[in-house]
Amino acid sequence: MQVMGKSSIDITPIRDYLESLIARYPAISSVWLMGSRANGAARPDSDWDLMVFADATILERLKSEEKQTAEELNIDLFVVYDGDNFEKPFWNSKSKTPKGDSLTSWRWRTVQPNLALYRRTNLPWEREPTQTRKAIKIWPD
């Protein structure tokens, strides 16, 4: 399975997880791929950074679920629960990204139906300003 119009991004390794997530939570409005995999800098061991637009109920339900599958697939999941603020429902031990933030502070803006640009908040150890990065909508098509 490849991202529509993005033949170089193969999401087959996480397809089953995505399909299961969307089936269990039909209120999810969209899923976006971010980070190195969306920006052409991924290594074979890179994680899958996913921004899921949903609501607070889904965030709370995900917090109580088993995180094993996401961690085994090296998925770093962020849930936007009120249109702006987002949080990780569980901690991926390999992640360096903070548990939560807001789309406003990340300067998230949708520039095309399947493309957003963002500039995340600097992490404490980062001296240089973060670069503008892209996010690619992978669901729905």
Image (cartoon, rainbow, N blue to C red):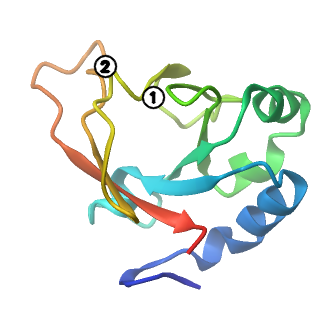
The residue that mark 1 highlights is 97
Q: Quadrant of the N terminus?
A: bottom right
Whether residue 95 is visible to the viewer of this picture, yes or no, is yes
50 vs 131: above or below: below
Please tell me which residue lies in front, 98 or 81.
Answer: 81
Which amino acid type is shown beneath numbered disc 1? Answer: Thr
**Is residue 93 left or right of 17 when viewed as pictured?**
left
Residue for point 61% across, 79% down: 12
| Image marks 1 and 2: residues in contact by CB distance under 8 Å | yes
Say the numbered circle drawn on residue 123: 2
Q: Position of residue 138 (x, y in %)?
A: 53, 67
Residue for point 68% across, 40% down: 54
Which amino acid type is shown beneath numbered disc 2? Answer: Leu
Disc 1 residue crowd, few under 14, some 14–19, many 20+, Cα 10 Å: some
Say the numbered circle drawn on residue 82: none
Q: Which of the marked residues, 1 or 2, is nearer the chain's N terminus?
A: 1
Q: How many numbered discs? A: 2
Disc 2 residue crowd, few under 14, some 14–19, many 20+, Cα 10 Å: few
89 vs 40: above or below: above
Residue for point 77% across, 68% down: 19
Whether residue 42 is visible to the viewer of this picture, yes or no, is no
Q: Position of residue 104 (x, y in %)?
A: 35, 24
Q: Quadrant of the C terminus?
A: bottom right
Q: Position of residue 80 (x, y in %)?
A: 59, 33
**Is residue 113 left or right of 74 when viewed as pictured?**
left
**Is residue 37 left or right of 19 when viewed as pictured?**
left
82 vs 67: above or below: above
130 vs 2: above or below: above
